[in-house]
Amino acid sequence: MGSGKKRIEKRKSEHIKIALSRDVAGREITTGLEKYRFLHQALPEINFSDISLSVSFLGKPLSAPFLISSMTGGTEEAFNINKNLALAAQERGWAMGLGSVRAAIENPATAYTFHIRTYAPDIPILANLGAVQLNYGYGADHCRRAVELTEADALVFHLNSMQEAFQPGGDTRFKGLLRRMEEICRVLEVPVGVKEVGWGIDGSLARRLFDIGVAFVDVAGAGGTSWIQVEKHRTEDSVMKAAAEAFADWGIPTSECIVEARREIPGGFLIASGGLKNGVDAAKAIALGADLAGFGRSLLPAAVSSAEEIARRLKQIELEMKIAMFGIGTVNVRELKGTDRICNIGERPF
Amino acid sequence: MGSGKKRIEKRKSEHIKIALSRDVAGREITTGLEKYRFLHQALPEINFSDISLSVSFLGKPLSAPFLISSMTGGTEEAFNINKNLALAAQERGWAMGLGSVRAAIENPATAYTFHIRTYAPDIPILANLGAVQLNYGYGADHCRRAVELTEADALVFHLNSMQEAFQPGGDTRFKGLLRRMEEICRVLEVPVGVKEVGWGIDGSLARRLFDIGVAFVDVAGAGGTSWIQVEKHRTEDSVMKAAAEAFADWGIPTSECIVEARREIPGGFLIASGGLKNGVDAAKAIALGADLAGFGRSLLPAAVSSAEEIARRLKQIELEMKIAMFGIGTVNVRELKGTDRICNIGERPF
Amino acid sequence: MGSGKKRIEKRKSEHIKIALSRDVAGREITTGLEKYRFLHQALPEINFSDISLSVSFLGKPLSAPFLISSMTGGTEEAFNINKNLALAAQERGWAMGLGSVRAAIENPATAYTFHIRTYAPDIPILANLGAVQLNYGYGADHCRRAVELTEADALVFHLNSMQEAFQPGGDTRFKGLLRRMEEICRVLEVPVGVKEVGWGIDGSLARRLFDIGVAFVDVAGAGGTSWIQVEKHRTEDSVMKAAAEAFADWGIPTSECIVEARREIPGGFLIASGGLKNGVDAAKAIALGADLAGFGRSLLPAAVSSAEEIARRLKQIELEMKIAMFGIGTVNVRELKGTDRICNIGERPF
Amino acid sequence: MGSGKKRIEKRKSEHIKIALSRDVAGREITTGLEKYRFLHQALPEINFSDISLSVSFLGKPLSAPFLISSMTGGTEEAFNINKNLALAAQERGWAMGLGSVRAAIENPATAYTFHIRTYAPDIPILANLGAVQLNYGYGADHCRRAVELTEADALVFHLNSMQEAFQPGGDTRFKGLLRRMEEICRVLEVPVGVKEVGWGIDGSLARRLFDIGVAFVDVAGAGGTSWIQVEKHRTEDSVMKAAAEAFADWGIPTSECIVEARREIPGGFLIASGGLKNGVDAAKAIALGADLAGFGRSLLPAAVSSAEEIARRLKQIELEMKIAMFGIGTVNVRELKGTDRICNIGERPF
Ligand SMILES: Cc1cc2nc3c(=O)[nH]c(=O)nc-3n(C[C@H](O)[C@H](O)[C@H](O)COP(=O)(O)O)c2cc1C
Ligand SMILES: Cc1cc2nc3c(=O)[nH]c(=O)nc-3n(C[C@H](O)[C@H](O)[C@H](O)COP(=O)(O)O)c2cc1C
Ligand SMILES: Cc1cc2nc3c(=O)[nH]c(=O)nc-3n(C[C@H](O)[C@H](O)[C@H](O)COP(=O)(O)O)c2cc1C
Ligand SMILES: Cc1cc2nc3c(=O)[nH]c(=O)nc-3n(C[C@H](O)[C@H](O)[C@H](O)COP(=O)(O)O)c2cc1C
């Protein structure tokens, strides 16, 4: 067991290192957001200073429709990152996801690395667990533990089948998970969400997830971080390295996930993430139907650096989003979501 | 106030310098004109020497359907540019726009830099003001002043929301401008036009503008000079610099603006500008529905150099336009505007 | 005759050498498989360990729906390659094709190079002859001989018109071959298949082939090895070298062959080959309608090296196929064949 | 007059030199033939040796459906080229066009450079004149003279409006030419054809030309030699050089001309030329509807070299055409013209 814990910690810190220093983007695949263009409104008829980004999530107000995607925890380094992210999220009024809390459940000594509520008393915080753990002994009690440890507002299950398939000794028993998640949704005291980790959730799965009672879905589509590439950099196994090449373009582009999911579940709470680079991408994601936009790896470098640095980064994303809204003349997130001033470039009739 | 004036002058001269020496084109965005191709007419059945480019604008005859876009004024350097442009425009029979006359209104000592009527007694001259100034204290009197100072034939309001958003301390109160411009249209003694500055006016706004009484619309679409890139080169602010990257492809391509606007306002006087490089581009713009074609930054180098140089440049554009017309067998601008010998390459059925 | 034999042997060994060391891919042509993308299923609801690749072919079970394409024989070097391939195919449970057995028929001393049944007692083995030989004196007896010599489960005729056209003194009398193959189908004791060698069999020919009684068709489409390029490297004739350039993009992409053939012959046994690089390509081919996927030149380097090396390569392809199936949640080949989780990228409506 | 003659001669020899040594291709424009692909027929059911390329043109048999495009004459160097081309055309059974005979009419001393009938007694020879000359004093007598001087089987008028527009002092009075050509068609003793010189004849003009009595049309489309680029290299005038850039993509791609013209004039004799590089291009052109395929500049290097060299080149083109026909299983040009084994790549439904 001790070595199991160590293994998780080693893996987590390798993940961070690789995500910071190596090329972990997929190839021949993009978010698809570059296929969409905002239709500039030359006469916006609004004042820039009137633009508001505020929304609410899990019953709490957010200053901006943004989420820091689940990333880390379990090591001292991870704690520093989480703390910086939490301070910045609190300052800017973003929601924040934590990395998988499994590390803390298996090794309570690391629980403090997930306990960022101290630094972020007011924002929605999301605890995180791999859904597949429900097939490896986890049940409602573990879920509850994850929420308590983190004082989270909700629990998010991540679906990471391809990551497990590429991880040596990965947990690849995915059978029956829908039923098990349904059970957790029924009994858990906080809302439950489901996310992918970079290959996307399509429309029909999104619908099935809302059918079993999840409170929100984060598509976490392709075009940004590819975990297969991350694992490629970790492994020495030449077969796995070569296989990773064959899957470099795997996944559903983020834009396709959003459009499909919104079509299938007109009223469900939808988070768009996966490869978002800036506030314009986020604005496009929301214009295409998302309620929140999530940022993962692109925040890491600043998060490693300092709370000030990451706060500046969040502010920049907000500013870009505001300018995009100004450019099309929408004054709040509700208007942005209903806008017809976004088009698929390929479908323009000239 | 004195420092406000100085600030405007400094900005103006930085603009010129950057426009001349830096890369200020957008990225991943083009005018869209390259998607159109003229259908060569192997037997034109006209004589080259019969081709006429003459049109009329604001009740005055033009030797060619061309406009020098509004660019500068307010400094000694700007005066030289304006003078050269005016001499050349007069010689070649083009219309000419002036840069924003606000500089002269706030600092009458610079008025002479806009007074080019001396050098161009016969051509249509357009005075220019930022529409947003109507929300910052400007009214009919200021507009009148702009026209008088320049002995202009018309006043053009420019819409530059994104430039203001990127300019430190920019004027970003755009609410209610349509009504205010309507008021000016009603009371001003000369015709009023509206233009963008490089992100384009779409069909529906064009229609609304004609509805409030503007005499002409200049789409000033994307694909040429991007003011966000200009401001990027001016700023030291790293947040603004990064934001500029996120907006590098902002705007509606010039060709899309023309086609849309012409569809919406079959009879309105339409100027096509934004990224036009030569007489073939101009011919395409007119074949797609524009009445005049405007050239901005691509004229600057010659304009800085001498009146002869810029006259040569204008002549070259005319020659290219004539050859294009010869190539499709149209003998005057009216025929060019009605031609069916232009096609969208992607829509050719082979 | 002796020199004729020598000529065949020399040609065969040149082919291997060129295929291993030179660029023999076509240009401006691909398999078309890159135009298809699997639609990731974030919740596969299967266990990885339950995935089975097993199918049956020619009445024998295969552990995986894979075939080693017909490649070689006739020389000592070829024997080594065949032996390595056979050992690996037996170990992994793949089917295996032999190169044209004509060499052994014309020169019985080389028969041993095709006799790999010793190393692969259980798998389906395919004897191979050029269909055009039926116009050059070959009949049912020669076909029988080819099957006996190799203890094969079936005989495959290859159609290689373009290779013959580019080969000096090639056998280019292709008239009447359909009737002659029909005759062989009727009288031969084992099933008869037909394959191309890299330019593809289209849907209508596939249908005609099943109509005359063939048991399976291997499309062997374009996008991988181009025999014209192989012959280009062999020839000194500058006319032929130049002609090879003109045909560098000849052929029907593998994906188009599969889709067309499956549409025309819903129930016929279909092998997809030509340019498959890995297990994801193979999975796509099967999802598009193929029953088996064949690998040719991409196996050669490992096959030259050792039985272990090539077995590792086969295993890698199987693993990639399994991961792809996991990624879309299909647990066996039958489900993969019927999947709707593959799409043509260009036809996605967003 | 003497200097006029000299000027023509100088121009002609500059043309040859530039065509041989400089980049004279258009830019961002192709023949469009690369958008078409032959659908390989794996079982051609013909014998290669049965393939025949023979057709007839102007009442004479051709061994292959090929024409050497009109190129030169008027200088000693041109005579050598014409002689080599004529010897090769006679040997291979191709038709041959001569460069504009105007040089010989204005300067009878150069008539011998066009008199290649001695070297090519049996093939169709085409005399050539600029159609625009009919507006500069030429009439039926000059046309007759051109035919007599060359012992030609037909006279071809070339339409070269854009070349004239770019040539200093070019002949640009193209008004009324259709009527004048009609008159020549009526009175001349030999058939009259019309060709472009590299920008293409569209379907509707092709129809009008057959309506006035021309015997054949040679589309001479874009994608190969661009005369604007040739003139660019000749001129010192910087305005003209810059204008040439603006027209670098002018013209109708050869493939579009063929498809359109064949649609408009189902029965008219149609020659495809402009940018054909090899026998596969020629086969595509014929499969798309042409009766003959013409080759211009790509023959020049061999033609300058020797009669043997150019004969080898012609033979190569024939071989490539035959292999293409073999590849799709068509045994003669009639079958090739009616084939359905060619497709527009972009229109394939997979
Ligand atoms: C270093 C790192 C660690 C991550 N750890 C988790 C995790 O523990 N749980 C989870 O649900 N997602 C995890 N993710 C996935 C992200 O939440 C996100 O879905 C994915 O990276 C795609 O978004 P991006 O392209 O913005 O990075 C991690 C991502 C990174 C880069
Ligand atoms: C140096 C410079 C100064 C400009 N100043 C003004 C201005 O004062 N008022 C205005 O309406 N447009 C101004 N413009 C915008 C131009 O009128 C034009 O709309 C824009 O540059 C796009 O056209 P282009 O791509 O041909 O340059 C300016 C452009 C440049 C390059
Ligand atoms: C070296 C070599 C030899 C081949 N010999 C034969 C042969 O004898 N008979 C045959 O039917 N195909 C032969 N082929 C063609 C292959 O079976 C296959 O159809 C073709 O190479 C395309 O598949 P690939 O792109 O996977 O290589 C040969 C291919 C190679 C590379
Ligand atoms: C050096 C040269 C001289 C030419 N001279 C003539 C000419 O006198 N008359 C004519 O009709 N076309 C002339 N052409 C045009 C060709 O006949 C042909 O239409 C054109 O070059 C396009 O074909 P290509 O791309 O195969 O060269 C000439 C072309 C070249 C390269």
Image (cartoon, coloured by chain):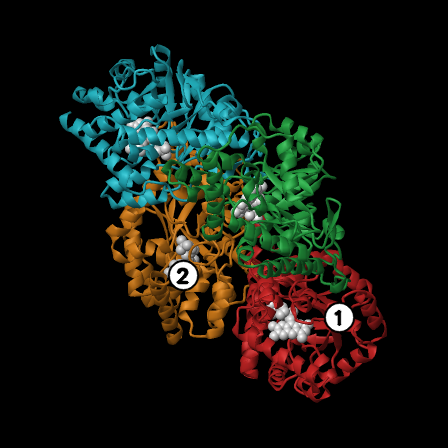
Chain colours: A red, B orange, C green, D cyan
Q: Position of residue A277 (x, y in %)?
A: 56, 67
Which residue sits furthest front? C109
For the residue pair C72 and B6, the one nearer the viewer reads as C72
Q: Position of residue C189 (x, y in %)?
A: 72, 35
Residue A233 coordinates in the image, percent (x, y): 56, 71
Res C198 seen here: no
Q: Foreground: D275 or C236?
A: C236
| Relative horizontal placement of residue B52, taking residue A109 as reference (left or right) | left
Q: Disc 2 residue type?
A: Val
Q: Is residue A154 left or right of residue C201?
A: right
Disc 1: which residue: A132
C43 or A39, nearer to the observer: C43
Q: Badge 1: few (under 14), some or many (20 or more) residues near its Cα, within 10 Å? A: many
Tell me the quadrant of ligand 1: bottom right
Displayed quadrant of residue D149: top left
Going 67% across and 44% down the picture, which residue do you hit? C151
Where's residue D186, x and y in %? 37, 11
Whether disc 1's CB lies below 8 Å from ligand 1 is answered no
Which quadrant is home to the N terminus of chain A?
Answer: bottom right
For residue C310, side relative to residue D236 (left or right): right
Ligand 2 within 8 Å, label 2 CB: yes
| Quarter occupied by residue D67 | top left
In the rendered image, the residue lying farthest to the left is D2
Residue labelled with disc 2: B24
Which residue shows up at 32% across the image and 67% down it? B109
Is disc 1 placed on a helix, strand or loop? helix
